[in-house]
Amino acid sequence: MATSALSRPVFSRRRVLEQLWLIFLQLLMTALLVSFLVPTLWMVSASLKASTEIFQHPITWIPREPQWSNYVRVFQVIPLAKFAENTVIVVALAVAGTLVSSVMVAYAFARIRWPGRDFFFSLLIATMMLPEVVTLIPRFIIFKYLGWIDTWLPLIVPYWCANTALYVFLIQQFFRGIPMELEEAALIDGAGRVRILTEILLPLCKPVIATVAVFALLQHYNSFLEPLIYLNSMDKWTLALGIRSINDSNAANWELVFAAGTVMVAPIVALFLVAQRYFVQGIAMTGFGGR
Amino acid sequence: MSVNATLSKTRLPSRLKLREWAAGYLFAAPFIVGFLAFTAFPMLYSIWLSFNKWDLLSPPRFVGLQNFVKMIADPRANLSLYNSAYYTVFAVPIQLLISFSLALALTQKLRFRDVYRAGFYLPIIVPLVASAVVWQRVFHYEYGILNEVLGWVGIPPQKWLFDVNLAKPAFIFMSFWMIGRQMVIFIAGLGNIPQSLYEAASIDGAGAFRRMWHITIPMMTPLIFYNMVIAIINSFQTFIPAKIMTDGGPENATLFVVLNIWQQGFQFFNMGYASALAWELFVIIVGFTIAQFYLSNKWVYYEA
C-alpha cells in the first residue's frame, strides 16, 4: 500500500475511486446502523410519549415532553417489580447451576481418565443437535408428575445438570490446553481434586467462564417458552411473561408496553456495553451464542 | 501416567486408578444424571407418548400409529410445515447475504468499525419477547414506523401482520434484523484469511472482484455453510415472534411448526399427537443436518 502510494501520483484514478468507494461504504454503513437501531430507539422514545403523541402523523422521533410518569404507571398496571425480582432469582440460580455443573463436568472430561469417558462425551456432543421441542412435552408431564408445575424448579434444576453441551465443551477445550503436569504435581503433594479445580484451574480460565456466564445469563433472561409452560400464577412470572401479559392486556397503550419493554431491555444492553468483549469473544470461539 | 505405572504391580486396577475413576464419575455425575433424567428418559417417554392418546385428564389410551397417520393427513400440520419451509427458504439465504456483506464491509478500512459492529449485533441482545412486541407495532397499519418510512418513498401502507400474503414476508423481514451472530462469525473468519494470499493475487494482477471470487469466498465456504446449517435449524424452531405477534394468524399464515406443536400440546392437550409432531420436526432437523454435511463435501472448501 505504502509503496504504491509513493510510486504513483497522489490523485491517480485508482486511488480516487478507492477513496470514493470507502466514503460510500461509510455512508451506507451509517445508514444501515441507524436502521438497525431504529426499532429499539423507537421503543424507548415512544415509551416516553403521551398516548396522543404516539397515534399522530407525522411521527415525532423525539417525544415533545417526556412523560416519565409512564414508567410509574407501568409498575402500577402490572407487578413489574415482582417480575423483575422473580427474574433475578431464577436467572441467578440457573446461571449459578450452569457454571458449577459445567465446570465440574468439563473437568471430568478434560483432566480425569475414567472408563466410559469418550462414550459420555459423544453423548454430550450429540445433545447439541437435539431440538428442544422433542423433550418439551415429556418433560412437562414428568415435572407435572413431580409436582413442579407452577414452581421455578423446572427452570432451574435441569441447569444444575450441565445440560447445555456447548458450555461444557467450551470449558473442556480450555482445560485441555492447560499442562497436565500442573495437576499431577499437586496430586502428589496430596491436594484434593476440588482444590486443584478451584485453586489452580479456575483462576486460569476466567475468560471462558465469563463468556459462559454471559451467554447463560442471556439465555435464561430471554427464556420464554419454558416459563410460559411451567408458570401459571402471576406472582411467579418472569419479565418475559410480564411483557407478554401487558402486551395482551394493554395492547392499545403502546407507551406502557414500550415502557415495560424498555425496563426489560435496559439492563441487558447495559451489560452488553460493559462486557462486549466476552460476547464477541464467545461467538468467535463457538459460533453460537445468543440464539 | 508414570505414577500409575510404577504403583500398579498387579493387573487389577490399582487403588490410585480406582480413585481416579471414582473422581471421574463423581465430577461427571451432574451430566450423567441430568442426561438420563432430562434427555434420555423424556425421549423414550416421548416415543411411548406418540403411540398414545392422552389429554392428561383421562388415562392414556394406546392408539398404535394413529397419531402418525393423522399427522400425514392433518391440514394444519402440513400448513405449519409449509409455513416454516417458506420462512426458511426465503429468510436464510438473504440473512447470509446481508451478514456476509456487512462482515465484508466492516473489514474494510472504515472509521468506527467497532461502533457499527456493536450496533448490528445489538438486536440479538434484546430479549426476543421485547423485540416481538416492538416489531408487532413496527408493522402496524396506521402508526407503525415501517409504513411511515415506506410512505416517504410513496409506497402505500400495507397491513403486514394482518395480510395473509404479507405476514410471512414480514416475519422474514424481521429476521434480517437479527443477523448479528452470523456477522460476527464471518468477521472472525475473514480475519483468519492469510494476507499473503491477497498479496500474491495482487502481484498477479487480480482485481478486487477476482480476489473476492477466488480467495475470500472459497476460504469462507466452511463458515458460510456452518452459518447456513445453524440458521436453518433456528428458522425451523421459530416460536416467540409467532406466539407474540400473530399467534399463528391471519388464517394460520404464521402457524409455524413449533407453534403448532405448542398449541396441540398446551392448548388442545393432545399430548400424544403433539409428541408425534415433535418427532416429525426432529426427523426434519436431523435429516437436514445430515444432508447438508453430506452435500458440504461437494462444495465446501476445507483447507488441507
Image: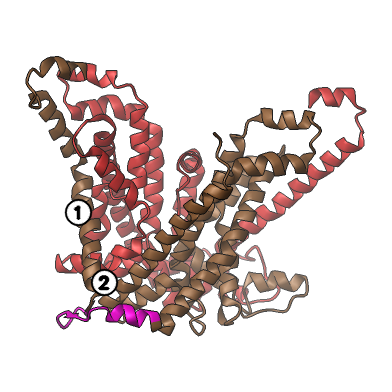
Chain colours: A red, B brown
Instruction: Using the image, determine if residue B117 lies above or below residue A7.
Output: below
Classify residue B71 by image quadrant. bottom left
Classify residue B276 by image quadrant. bottom left
- Whether residue A48 is visible, yes or no, is no
Classify residue B165 by image quadrant. bottom right
| Residue A65, x across and y down, in percent | 61, 65
Residue matched to label 1 = B36
Horizontal side of B168 relative to A32 (left or right) equals left
Q: What stretch is highlighted in magenta?
A: B53-72
Based on the picture, tell me whether residue B56 belongs to the magenta stretch.
yes
| Residue B260, x across and y down, in percent | 39, 76
Based on the picture, tell me whether residue A17 belongs to the magenta stretch.
no
- Residue A233: mark: 2
Q: Give the camera-side residue of B25 and A94.
A: B25
What is the secondary structure assignment of the residue under circle 2?
A: loop
Label 2, residues with CA under 10 Å away: few <14, some 14-19, many ≥20: few
Chain label for disc 1:
B
Q: Residue at 20% across / 78% down in the picture?
A: B56
**Amino acid type at image mark 1:** Leu
Q: Tell whether label 1 touches label 2 (CB within 8 Å).
A: no
Q: Give the camera-side residue of A121 and A142.
A: A121
**Quadrant of the rendering where the N terminus of chain B is positioned:** top left
| Residue B279, x across and y down, in percent | 33, 68
Horizontal side of A155 relative to A194 (left or right) equals right
What is the secondary structure assignment of the residue under circle 1?
A: helix
